[in-house]
Structures are given as structure tokens and as C-alpha cells.
Image (cartoon, rainbow, N blue to C red):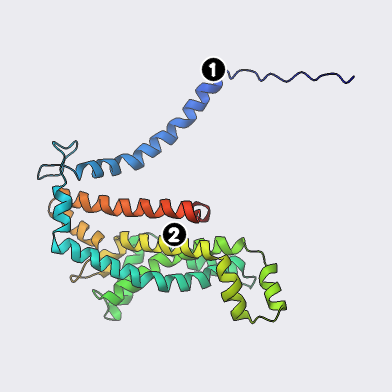
Amino acid sequence: MAERRTPRVRAPRTARARVRRALALVPVVLVCAFLLLPLLVVAVSSFNADNNFRFPPSGLSLRWYAEVFGSAQWLDALGYSLRVALLVVPVVVVLGTLGGYAVGAGSFPGRRALGLLFLSPMAVPGVMVGLALLYQLQRAGMVGSAEGLWLAHLVVTFPFCVRVVAVSAAALDPRLPRAARSLGATPLRTFLTVTVPLLRPGIVAGAFLAAVISLGEVAVSVLVAGAGEATVPVRIYSAVQVQLEPTVAAVSTLLLLVSVATIAVLDRTVHVSRFL
């Protein structure tokens, strides 16, 4: 009869190992607290019953949310932000899909250089991008116009769409488009009926990221929006220059909820975290 093997008994975790693990979690906890506590302070302060911005609030009230939805200025800013985002997303999805597919699945000379060029606005500070756009738009006479703001948001959101589509394109099986071509499909039909459906998770993630970034963009918008209509972030920036009111906290909390809900839905449906 074969000898029975006695199961190995793992040695109990020593106190030193537990201490090392606890110490390794300290920087993680500190970073999370540094990122989340300011958001929590703003969200809680938006329910303050007083007329000033304070934490902790002296009382809880929804009056500032009612004031936001009853204010023509805030509603106009929200409508303008939504219009800009709705105009930006379709165009950036088309351009980002083509650019991301070329960078992620292409095999032509200069592909890496082209990818770096597409993603360069992500690496440049937003103020520098805004100043460059301000110079170009001023020469074209488009500063303060909806068209100029639309072009600026295209430049800002395009790299993110390219990034997520490129990751999705790099994971494609090249045999599938090749099989469609061998069956007589044209390159355009192969791209539209085979490649695009396979890229759908990346395209959807890029579209929602572009919308969220467009709604929250402030550095570029402040420089190119002008003195006419303003987006919600520009209106917030202008409001805090005079007085920090709880209405600003209420609007910021609403934008935060929209962003968090969008990212949560994307992560559950298309697993957006693997594209970032």
C-alpha cells in the first residue's frame, strides 16, 4: 500500500510578518484619505443649513440643492455643459476609434510615434494646453464661442478615447478580420461589421469617459470660454472667486455623483478599469 502523505501544516504567521503587512497598508490608507476626505468634506458641507460654507455643518438641509435647480444661471451653465458634451462625444468617438485602432492594431512605420502624438495632451499640463488653444483660437477669432470650446474639448478628450480603444484593439484576434476578407468582404465592410463590434467595449468606455471629462473640464475651459456662456466648472470657478457658498458644494457634489455613477456602470458593464 502506498504511504499516506501527511498534509503540510503551514507555519503560523509570525508577529513580524503581520507588522510588516500593517505598515505596508499605512501609505495606502494615507493616500486614500488624502484623495477622499476633501470630497467627503465638500459633499457633507453641501447639506449645511447655514448661509456659509462650513464643516461640520451646523444643521442639515436641502435648501442649496433647491437653490441650484431654481437658479437660471446654474441651469444655463448645466445646459451649456450638456450641449457641449453631446456635440463632443460623437465626433471624438469616431476620431478616437480610428486613431485607437490604428495605434493598437496597426503595423505601419511610425505607429509608436503616432501613438505618442495622440496621447501627448494627457502628458502636458492643462494650463499649457489651454494657453496653446487660446493662442490658436484667438488667431481664428473663435475665443468665447461655442465652436471654440467644442474644439478645445475635442483636443482634451481625444487622447482618452484613443487610449481605451487602442487597448481594446491590441487584444483583437487578427484572424477574424482576415477570415472576413477571405470570404469576399471589402476592407470597409470588414471594419464596420467585424472590427467595430469587437471594439464596442472600448468605444463605449471611451464615449462615457469623454463625456465625463468634458463635463468636468475647467483648466482649458476657463481660458477659451470667454465672457459669454460658461460651463458648470467655469461657473464654479467664477463663484469661488467672490465667496465660497454652499451652492458651489451642491453643484460639485452633483457632478461627483454623475462621475462616480458613470464609472461604476462602465466598470460593471464593459470593465472600464482594464482599459485605463
What type is the residue that disc 2 sits on? Ala
x then y, percent, for residue 84:
30, 70
Give the residue at x 35% y 54%: 259
> Which residue is at 39% across, 39% downward?
32
Q: Is tag 1's residue or tag 2's residue first in the polypeptide sequence?
A: 1
User: Is label 2 in a helix, a strand or a loop?
Assistant: helix
Q: Secondary structure at mark 1?
A: helix
Image quarter for residue 232? bottom left
Q: Nearer the viewer, residue 132 or 77?
A: 77
Q: Residues within 10 Å of mark 2 (few under 14, many from 20)?
A: few
Nearer the camera: disc 1 or disc 2: 1
In the image, 40: left or right of 106?
Answer: left
Q: Position of residue 29 (x, y in %)?
A: 41, 34
Amino acid on which disc 1 is placed: Ala
Question: Would you call the spot at circle 1 few (<14 residues within 10 Å), some (14-19), or many (20 or more)?
Answer: few
- Per the model, the C-alpha gap separating discs 1 and 2 is 44 Å
Q: Which residue is mark 2?
A: 123
Instruction: Give the farthest residue toward the left.
Output: 51
Q: What is the quadrant of residue 127 in the picture?
A: bottom left
User: Which residue occupies the foreground of this view, 245 or 203?
Assistant: 203
- At 27% from the left and 77% from the top, the residue drawn is 138
Measured from the top left, where is residue 216 in percent x and y?
31, 59
Residue 97 versus residue 62 in the image, above or below = below
At which x and y percent is residue 41?
Answer: 25, 41
192 and 34: which one is in front? 192
**According to the image, label 1 marks what residue?**
15
Which residue occupies the extreme right position in the image? 1
Does residue 217 appear anywhere in the picture?
A: no
Tell me the quarter of the image containing the N terminus: top right
Quadrant position of residue 101: bottom right
77 sits to left or right of 187: left
